[in-house]
Image: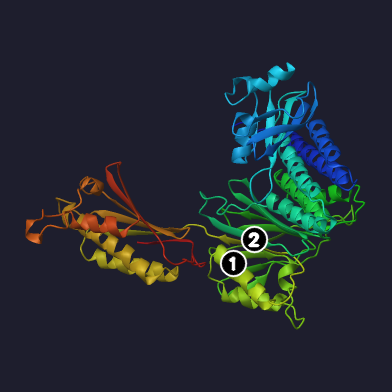
Amino acid sequence: MFTEPKQDRRHVERRNRDKQLLRCERELEAATRITSALFENLALDELVVKALEIAIEVVNAECGSILLADSPSKQLIFQYSIGTSPIPSGTAIPWDQGLAGTVFQSAKPIIISDAQKDPRHLESTEKLTGYRTRDLVTVPLKRWEGDPIGVLQVMNKREGLLTEEDLAILTIVSAITASSIELHRTMAEKERIGSELRIASEIQKSILPRTFPPFPDRADFDIFATTIPALEMGGDFYDFFLIDDKRLGVVIADVSGKGVPAAIFMAVSRSLLKATALTCVSPSECLEHVNQLLCQDNESAMFVTVFYGILHSDTGELEFSNGGHNVPYLICGNRVSPVGRPENMALGFLNEANYRTSRTSLKGGETLVLYTDGVTEAMDAQGQLFSEQRLEHTLQRLAHQRPVDLLTTLVEDVQAFSRGTVQTDDITLLALQYRPAVVQELTLANRPSEVDRLVSAVARFAHDHRIAEPDLRVVALALDEVLTNTISYGYDDQVPHEIRVRLTLANSRLSAEVEDDAKPFNPLTVPSPDLTSPIEARSVGGLGVHLVRSLMDQVDYRRESGKNHLIMSKRLSGVAQPDTKAERHGDH
């Protein structure tokens, strides 16, 4: 066996990390330069042209354009175009045609490596200038609510082709530019303050992941997050991402300050955190590197508290580092306990700050709850705080709920507590429930008495894992029917045979696989009985198979290696909580 030399592996890892760091620096440069332009009191045209210049320069492209939507004419109009052979201002295209129209209608960006081969590319614009487009990125100028207000296009990278990394940078440029356009469209000064807060909220919302479940094909964990912005919006944010197939990163953070500056610092911090985390460094190494980047040229003296954790989904181990953030909680059954302590410094304060990685373990059904101080510092009409103690009691009461229900109810409790007062800080929460598959295997003989043993084993499994009684009855009845039919009709000899049953509980679904070496029999080929006919007129057989199909959500069959495999599954009506004492065991 040949192994890659350790020095070569380190060289590759270092090179990949350098690429990630370069991307971080490019994103930070773009966001910083546009942020500076925001506060130069430039006219709208000057501001947008400057943003477009920054976009073209940072991704090293030849030219770019910003097209704004005109609702009365249903057109996209080239308002700004700079670089090689710019398109004349005022040139219009239908807002549902071409690559620009596709992005405008879908609100999703597109990267094209060869525009000439893409049927959506409009050659009519090239004829105006004689310029030939090779590769391009088209990004929506998107508000959080409503339709996009236009699109940003950047074309022809000077070296190589435009990449996903360029798209990430242009997405930040586009979000801030769109928000800037909206801000400058607000003419009255008394409306300007409200617009800034709305734009800050849109920046926050456009950056935070809001699709749940975010990983629908993953059954080993359940995650949900939410944020309720305050009237004077701060810089809370959360994030989650798969580092690889076995590691999930989770982040919650709170930026100092309010309004647009906090929102932009939040966007930069999130981008740096995620980009660094994806280089597979430890939580402490991630925070140390991001802290050093944030400390550079931090003239605003802003900072951010951060909790960053990595869940190893195959073992339940949680690595984490806390940069001055509120201590999270772990819900273990009816017990709620803090996870670590805020022993490290917030990011952005001190360039030489050191950070420490700690570890704990999550067992099946346990839930990690991350939050910001907008939860515990919510105040009632008498000036009392919601407090850590009240939060712990609330989490105990909601211990057996799924993340989405837990956080929804918790937010309602906080809002009810502070009713009649003004929310002064963002309320941000993230809940991660570890849900590894639980498997029990049983080996039965082909004797009628074994049916009772199977039903008893299923009842114990349901009790151990808090499966609701109605769900237990359905699964037990289906297994009873399958095993009885197999024992009664599957064998022609008197020789003992083994029948294996495997129960699997994962992601609120209970599956049962029955494996036997009886005669080949595919129940899915049995026609459904005519239940409208009198009993005496019906054909014999078929009712048992019909019963199983009716009881279970899904039934599959295969014949493999001389054995029948019948797999049945049922979505549970209640939230099953895996037993933490044994995640896999057998009964023989």
Task: Name the element at disc 1.
Answer: helix
Q: Is residue 132 visible?
A: no
Residue 556 location, x and y as percent?
32, 48
Q: Nearer the viewer, residue 87 or 501?
A: 87
Q: Nearer the viewer, residue 166 or 482?
A: 166
Q: Residue at x 85, y 36 (%)?
A: 50
Left or right: 93, with 547 as reference point: right
Mark 2 residue type: Thr
Quarter where residue 263 is shown: bottom right
Q: Given the current orientation, which residue lies at the most extreme front position?
A: 72
Dot 2 corresponds to which residue?
Answer: 226
Q: Tell me: residue 341, above or below residue 69.
A: below
Dot 1 corresponds to which residue?
Answer: 408
* Crowd class of label 1 (few under 14; some 14 to 19; many from 20; radius 10 Å): some
* Cβ atoms under marks 2 and 1 closer than 8 Å: yes
Q: Nearer the viewer, residue 486 or 411?
A: 411
* Crowd class of label 2 (few under 14; some 14 to 19; many from 20; radius 10 Å): many
Q: Residue at x 17, y 57 (%)?
A: 531
Residue 407 location, x and y as percent?
60, 66
Dividing the image into 4 quarters, which one contains the C terminus? bottom left
Mark 1 residue type: Thr
Task: Name the element at disc 2.
Answer: strand
